[in-house]
Image (cartoon, rainbow, N blue to C red):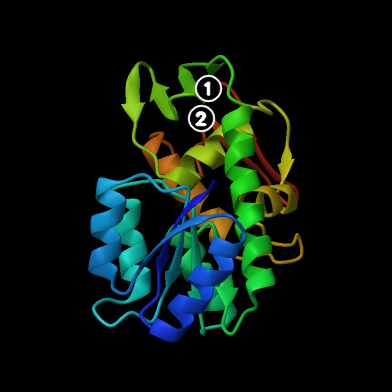
Amino acid sequence: MVSVLLVEDDPVVRSAVTRALTGLGHAVLPVGTALEALREVAGARFDLVVLDLGLPDMDGADALRMMRGVCDVPVIVATARDDEAEIVRLLNAGADDYLVKPFSSEHLAARLSAVLRRARAVEASSTAPLRIGELTIDLDRREARLAGREVHLTRKEFDLLAYLAARAGKVVPRAELLANLWNLPGRHDDQTLDVHLSWLRRKLGERAAQPRYLHTVRGVGFKLTAAE
């Protein structure tokens, strides 16, 4: 049984989505404010969060960033804002996927299943720690260390690093990273990937102009190699 935290202030929508997810066999905890949601994720473990952005006490994007500060639970944001810049902002803020309102229960169920499949695939692929030079990525613990020092990464930063590390030395196309880590079609070329790579480089103590581990192959993609 999948445990879902549903954050939606509209009681009619909240009730309808709760019924739909419960009917699919999921355990659903519905709440109506961002503060309630933050309190719940800080005190309990959920498999997934469905987060409405139009909340009465706090902008949903701000709630998402605060949520990312206390847990790495997969989050699907539900928004009426369908412009590309807004979607990119939400993905950069830590969302795993998004739904544009209004949406059907079937659409929500499909998105939920896709996000859970990606999360479980990462867990199932966990093996011995990956080592590239002085960089160690422990997939089971979801920890990264550089020369023995822990590198504190967000969920998406770790997923990006682990994906590249599993293919160390190989060039991974942008489209592959966007499709597998953000569920974005290959033609959807935006700043999401570049922003996360920039943050990741900073935490690894390098710059794009002077890469040690993360190398850009212009016009193709990126590769992770041992620092020389």
Q: Quadrant of residue 93?
A: bottom left
Identified at 74% across, 62% down, the residue is: 185
Identified at 56% across, 41% down, the residue is: 160
Front in this rendered view, residue 181 or 209:
181
Please provide percent x and percent y for residue 181.
62, 49
* Location of mark 1 (residue): 227
Name above or below for residue 98 compared with residue 85. above
**In the picture provided, is 110 more to the left or to the right than 89?**
right
* Location of mark 2 (residue): 212
**In the picture provided, is 183 more to the left or to the right than 30?**
right
Name above or below for residue 200 compared with residue 37. above
Identified at 33% across, 26% down, the residue is: 150
Mark 1 falls on what kind of element? loop
Q: CB atoms at circles 1 and 2 under 8 Å apart?
A: yes
Which residue type does callout 1 highlight?
Ala
Name above or below for residue 150 compared with residue 98. above
